Image (tube, grey):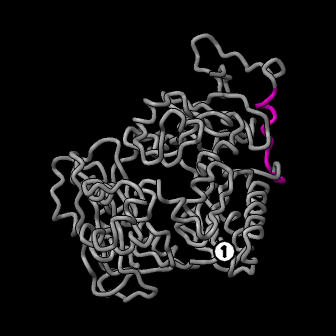
Amino acid sequence: MRPAPTILHLDMDAFYASAEQAAKPSLRGKPVVVGGIGPRGVVATASYEARVFGVRSAMPTAQARRLCPNAAYLSPRFTLYRQVSEAVMELLHELSPLVEPLSLDEAFVDLEAGGVPAETAAVRAVGEKLRRDIRSATGLTGSVGLAGAKMLAKIASEAAKPNGLVVIEPGTERELLGPMTVRTLPGVGPATAETLRRAGIHTVAETAEAGEAELVRLLGKAHGAGLYAMALGRDDRPVVAERDAKSISVEDTFEVDLTDRTRVRTEVLRLADRCVQRLRAAGRSGRTVVIKVRNYDFSTLTRSETLRGPTDDPGVIREAAVRLLEAVDTTGGVRLLGVGVSGLADFTQEDLFAQLATEREAEELAKAAPEPVGGTGEGGEPEERPRRWHPGLDVVHEEYGAGWVQGSGVGRVTVRFETPWSAPGRVRTFAVGDPALRPGEPLPLVGGAPEGTQSSEPAILPKSLSPEPPASAEGSEPVSGEEMSSR
């Protein structure tokens, strides 16, 4: 334990939802939920306005909609979140060379390694300046915890939410932790908490009073001894700049259970390709391929196969994933599939059969390729599949400029035209195939319109000053750009 609170933990406040509110003026101060928008989607982040209604992270989106039907439900935009995260992490690296990212919006910082004096006043000043710098650089807020150990710094940042700073002075740990529930301690999940509850242990103070021997008897040597130390406020884990990933995986939940064996196989191949892309982006290879299958009744199973050596070859990983799938009964219906690679390494071992496997798979996919949706147009050319306009997606219109998708359906897409630096914008609707409308890129949250960005000013004029849309002939389809009334 350090004699001064020189470990800092930063946690951005409702990160995804706050970023969406900053990007969309019409959503500021209103409930926003980011995550999967389908019937089987899961909430990634809810704004504080939505949390008032009981919406929480990891909650099924369908349940969130029942609790807060008037919230804006948006698909994640990870391109934007990564941009903001990079700006925040850059500020953290200015404080110290030892920065341990936990996710896009959370990290530990060793201020002692950055030369900050081991004094409460000095570290508090650094924490306050960091909060101001983050607000200035991103337009978002973050909560800061400062303590002499990682566990305590994280507890402090949680207590500081939203947009605050809490310092835990060394020597006050046990007094602070005592009345807290055992779930506060790292590594205590529902199963461990239930085991402790049955033994009459509910708080951190009761955990410490139980003694190390009793905790080891209940939870095993490693877990019990570690939990006892944390209950006493002891945590000697260092801030580690490089966290080595143990595995890389991807998974998808389907809106409708998959019962067609060919479709299941196609999805596994697609997931294997995505997994390889992430593997290569990280500059890694792996030797164990894992598939995950969740059935219609929520029963989940995994199957794995260890290869002769580490590889990042898509043909080898696809072939292994398909072999594993063949041993799984999917006739009842599959609601989730996943493909992962573990046993990571920084080198690859060439497989002489990889090229052959890739070529064979390509031939099979070519034979099984489905006909284009919508048939063929004039001259026998396949018609273009309509675009999918997910809520929250960035778009650009040739006339109205930048905006975002509010919703789509029945061949129409509704767009609100506004930017992070504009007033709340006007809403218009278009045909889903309107050639003037195209996907856009996230705009910066602060700093005003970048040079060359088309303004959305025509869309945010007061209604009385907006030009009337051209009238369409009676009985004809609405013209592109028809104005819709505000909800």
Residue 454: say if magenta.
Answer: yes
Picture quadrant of residue 359: bottom left
Instruction: Give the amino acid type for the residue marked by disc 1 in the picture.
Output: Ala
368 left or right, relative to 391: left
Q: Which residues are magenta?
A: 450-461
**What residue do we see at 46% from left, 69% from top?**
232
Q: Does residue 381 appear in the picture of this structure? A: no
159 left or right, relative to 453: left
Location of mark 1 (residue): 4
Q: Is residue 315 above or below residue 41?
A: below
Q: Nearer the viewer, residue 82 or 311?
A: 82
**What residue do we see at 78% from left, 34% from top?**
423
Q: Nearer the viewer, residue 460 or 358?
A: 460
Q: Nearer the viewer, residue 77 or 394?
A: 77
**What residue do we see at 58% from left, 16% from top?**
476
* Image quarter in which the C terminus is found: top right
